Amino acid sequence: MKRANFDFTAEWFRLLLILISGLLIGGIMFLFNSLTGFFTAFTLIIQVVVIIVFCLWYLRLIFAYIKELRKKNPEKKVGVPLGWAIVGLIITLINFIVWIGLSVMMYNFPKVVFFVPTALAMVQILYIFIKSNRRNNKDWLLLTYNAFSFLYIFIWMLFDFGVDMPGILGVFSHTITSDVMWWQLFFVNTGAFFSPTFIFPPYLLNPRYYFAQPVSEYLAEKKALEEEKDVSVEKVESEKQIEAAETEESEQEKILPGERKPFFEEREKQRKIDEEVTAIEKEISRMKIDKDVQHAEHIGSSDISFSYRQFIARFDVFLRTFSLSVILILIVLTPLMFAGNISMNVSPAYNKLDYAQRSDMVIAVDGSVFSSYDFEGNFSYYWNNELNNEIDLAKELQVTHLRYNIKSRVLNNNKSKQILDSGIALIQSQGLKVILAVSGDLFFQKKELINNIYSDAITFAQDYQPDYMVVYNEINGELLNNINEASTLDDWLPAIANVTNKIKSLSPSTKVVSSLLATKNGLSDLQTMLAYNTSLDVISISFYPIFFGWRFNLLKEYSTLFHQESSGEKFWIGETGMETLNYGEEAQARYLAKVLDLAAKTTELDADGVCIKSLIDNHGYTIEHGITSHMGLVYFNGKKKKSFDAVKYAAEVIFSIV
């Protein structure tokens, strides 16, 4: 039987090792992040580290093009025309300035600012690749890496203008964006479902690497030159040997008998020399020199030190390996993402669903005006116009409530507190009802957070008497992740009961809501909460979809358990929504329509309320025109998505308006 013979030095084996290593590292990071939240907390730092790495690479390219402009020795030419060297230098400088200088503030700039240099870089990359003397498997994968970067930024830019690809093009485009989202979720940030946080700049190809002679040709030419040189050297050496022999003969005539060196000593000396040469040749034959390293050394300038050339070679290999690990994982995810996007577009369209009529049902949307503020709690300068726009949109949707998530820093800012006073009054005067979520602030100790929520709840109850107030939102999710102390749901139930009773004593008309994040383990938390006398009016579930079925079966498990064990509370889908950047307009419209359809039917979820996240694509880290999430029913530029019509139609049927 013939034994299989694997070549562990083959390129396919190295790529497989890169993929396996990348998945293992990603898995460890994901588990560690799930337990500690370490990488989520330091996402910005991770992004800065990546920027530094690419900064070094871009500087390398800039120097490579400058070297092409200044080359004096024709033998150093690597095939870059002078005109293209100038264009390449300009494109590299533009990308360097934009990606290195602005990428940390990416959410606060129109994406066209990043798309233009990316498009220029893509032209440069394609030119280099087409004219290249090197097209190995790894080089094709690097081209794919750049194609992913280009298409991702292109799709994101389209969303700034309110454009989504239709039909099958949409499925393909959101396969790419959801691919990147899942890669980020796996490696960096567990919040990447909703906000892209780890963006890669284009990997500009090094023209000196790709335009240089193939290594085989270079080595063949070098060998021919050396052989030619050896012939001339041999001729000179033979002449020297003849001359030396004649000299030696004349000198030997002068040597007396007995003075000549013994023959066996000369033979022993020659034997040792031969052994050393053989050992060196054997060691060299064992060394497997990486062709990429060899090539990088070949194109390295001869006027810099060998150690620096070695550093450049290693850095080139490191960056190629880094890029390959990204693209290999994205390629592995692609079939899953495509199938997932297909599955999200097979649910019936919103106008083909038979919604039940529920006149007492709550349908709310998250607003942005009072949920977006800077670090000091300041609202947007244009808050008044933005609020009027949200009120008009909410009325057109036929929703019953506007919800805002407000942190303590807003209440501690006198100017923002005055704006909030007038804004809430304006909403209520327009016939809409208000849901205020007490969000606390950046506290990492349990006692501090409890006191903070209690204090803010008193302010809301006394000053605004909202129809509903949300306390301890996602008690088994995001809220507990921010606390340094180990705790269970049982530790928080007395605090929930305490603040609930206080709110009702100050504002009897206000209904109090608390929520759980819909996870498989959350079912036991729901059972625990229902068994405790919290005095809550509503227990809500935060529910977001994933691929293949949207997890509706899990949501039905929550509904079944609630209706079996509830002692008078109402059941809400307290937060739900879908990212259109990652999944598309069509998928979002179908998903929200399906949630409203199931929620309204007593034979399905039998929910008393649904709150959709959100009305308008959310603001970024600052409050002026930055976008971190595309979960809105309306684009940031004001254009309505398909989901806007879907929610409007569902509300009209549920409330018997049509």
Image: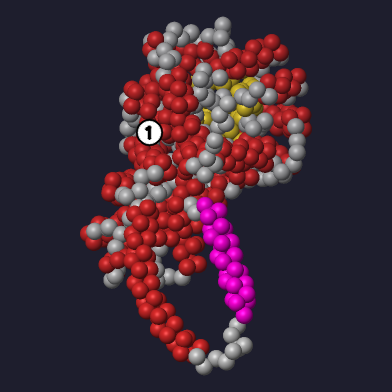
Q: Is residue 480 above or below residue 621?
A: above
Q: Measured from the top left, where is residue 305 in percent x and y?
A: 46, 70
In depth, the one of 549 and 283 nearer the eye is: 283
The residue shown at (45%, 52%) is 291
Instruction: Quadrant for residue 66, please give it.
Output: bottom left
Q: Which residues are magenta?
A: 262-288
How many marks overall?
Answer: 1
- Residue placed at 44% from the left, 7% from the top? 354
| 22 and 427: which is toward the camera | 22
Above-or-below relation of 405 to 262: above
Using the rendered view, name the quadrant where residue 350 is placed.
Answer: top left
Disc 1 on helix, strand or loop?
A: loop
- Prevalent SS, magenta region: helix
Task: Name the residue at the front extreme.
Answer: 257
Residue 570 vs 577, above or below: the answer is above
Residue reaching furthest left?
83
Residue 287 colored in magenta in the image: yes
**Pointer 1: what residue?**
635
Is 372 included in the stretch rendered in magenta? no
Circle 1: is it few (<14), some (14-19), or many (20+) Cα within 10 Å? many
Snapshot quadrant of residue 430: top left
Q: Is residue 496 visible?
A: yes
Q: Amino acid at mark 1?
A: Tyr
Give residue 29's position: percent from left, percent from top: 62, 41
* Percent coordinates x, y for residue 203 in the rendering: 40, 49
Q: Is residue 160 left or right of residue 21?
A: left
